[in-house]
Image (cartoon, rainbow, N blue to C red):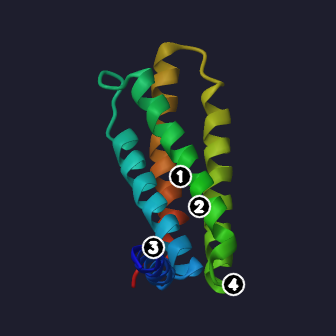
Amino acid sequence: MRRRAACAALLAALALGACGQSKADRAKSTVCSARTDIKKQVDSLKGLTLSTATTSQISTSLKAIGDDLGKIAGAQGDLSAQRRQEVQKANQAFTSQIKDIASSLGSATSLSEASSAVTSALQKLATSYEQTLAKVDCSG
C-alpha cells in the first residue's frame, strides 16, 4: 500500500513538473538571462580605466560574455521562428563585432596606443551590445 502511494506521488510530481514552462518559454528565459548578464559584463568593462583595469577582470568578463553567447546559441533552436530569427541575427552581429574589436587590439605599438585601443574597444563593445542584443525583446 505504501509503495503504491509512493509511486502515485512520484507520478503526480512528474506530471506537475511537466506542466511548467514550454520549451520556447525556457529558451526565452535562457536567452534573456544571458542577455542580462552580457549587459552587466559590458557595463563592467565599459567602466574600467587603464588605472583600474586588470587583465583578470577583463578576461573574466570576456569569458562570461562568451559563455552567455554560447547559452543564447544553444537556446535558439527552441524559440519560436520569429524570435529565433531575431536572436540569431543579434547574436551573430554581436559575435562578429567582438571578433572585429579583438582583432583591432593587436595593432597597438605603444602603451599609450594600447590604452587608447582598449578604451575604444570597450566603448565599441558597449555600442555593439546596444545595437544588437539589447534590441532582443525580453518583455512578457
Question: Amino acid type of disc 3?
Answer: Arg
Q: Which mark is residue 51?
A: none
Quarter placement of the C terminus: bottom left
Q: CA distance from mark 3 to mark 1?
A: 44 Å
Circle nearer the viewer, 3 or 2:
3
Query: Which residue is identified by label 1?
Result: 68
The residue at which mark 2 appears reads as 72
| Residue drawn at x 58%, y 78% as measured from the top left | 23
Indicate left or right for 95 with 127 as reference: right
First of labels 3, 1 by sequence position: 3
Query: For the residue labelled by badge 1, is the local secondary structure a helix, a strand or a loop?
Result: helix
Q: CA separation, marks 3 and 4?
A: 45 Å
Q: Hey, what amino acid is under mark 4?
A: Ala
Residue placed under numbered mark 3 in the picture = 3
Quadrant showing the N terminus: bottom left
Within 10 Å of disc 1 (Cα), the crowding (few <14, some 14-19, many 20+) is many
